[in-house]
Amino acid sequence: MTERQLHKTLQEHQAWVGNSNQSVRADLRGADLRNMDFTGADVRFIDFRGADMRGCNLSDANCSHADFRGANLSAATCRRTKFTNAKMQGANLEGTDLRSAEMQYADTTGASFVPAMSDADLRKAIAAVPQQAEATKHPERGRGGRE
């Protein structure tokens, strides 16, 4: 996808968010969006499932309710990005800069989550810790040990 195509898609999506009858919700499933600039963009509700978003800049973007399931956001810059209620199951967030990102109620179950820089608010994020990882972190659990 080119920058021009992306810009047109985002404009049409903004009309959809504004309840325009002549527009459609953006569907960027599986799109090649590597290194695209979404700085300050309103991408609420966009379907990014399986998209390749390596190296994207999503700083100051509103990604609330967006669907990033299985997307590759490795090495992306997401400073002050709002991921409230985003679906991020299975997303690759390795090396992602999440400084000051808001992730309240974002579902990061199964996501590869090794941020490069982060002071993201993860207090209300939804994430399941795999049992094997939990057993490694707390070896006394699962062997009749005390918690």
Image (cartoon, grey):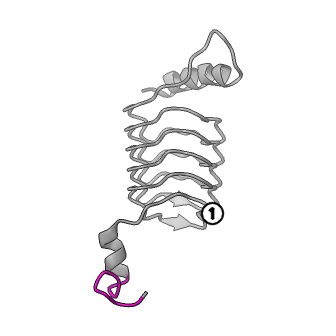
Which residue extends farthest right?
Answer: 18
* Placement of the C terminus among the 4 image quadrants: bottom left
- Residue 28 lies, in percent from the top left, at 45, 29
Residue 42 lies, with reference to residue 119, above or below; the image says above
Between residues 145 and 37, which one lies in front from this camera angle? 145
Q: How many marks?
A: 1
- At 59% from the left edge and 40% from the top edge, which residue is drawn? 65
Asked if the stretch drawn in magenta spans residue 49, the answer is no
Q: Residue furthest front?
A: 144
Q: Residue at x 40, y 90 (%)?
A: 146
Whether residue 92 is situated above or below residue 62 in the rendered picture: below
**Left or right relative to 113: residue 10:** right
Residue 43 placement, left or right of 145: right
Q: Quadrant of residue 61?
A: top right
Residue closest to the far top:
22
* Tag 1 secondary structure: loop
Please provide percent x and percent y for residue 70.
37, 44
Give the x, y percent position of residue 80: 65, 54
Q: Residue at x 38, y 56 (%)?
A: 110
Query: Which of these two is toward me, 136 or 54?
Result: 136
State the image coordinates of residue 142 (x, y, percent, origin top left): 31, 80
In the image, taking residue 70 as reference, residue 47 lies left or right, namely right
Few, some or many residues within 10 Å of mark 1 (<14, 14–19, 20+): some
The residue at which mark 1 appears reads as: 121
The kind of residue tagged 1 is Asp
Q: Quadrant of the N terminus?
A: top left
Residue 143: in magenta span: yes
Q: Which residues are magenta?
A: 138-146
Q: Main secondary structure of the magenta part?
A: loop
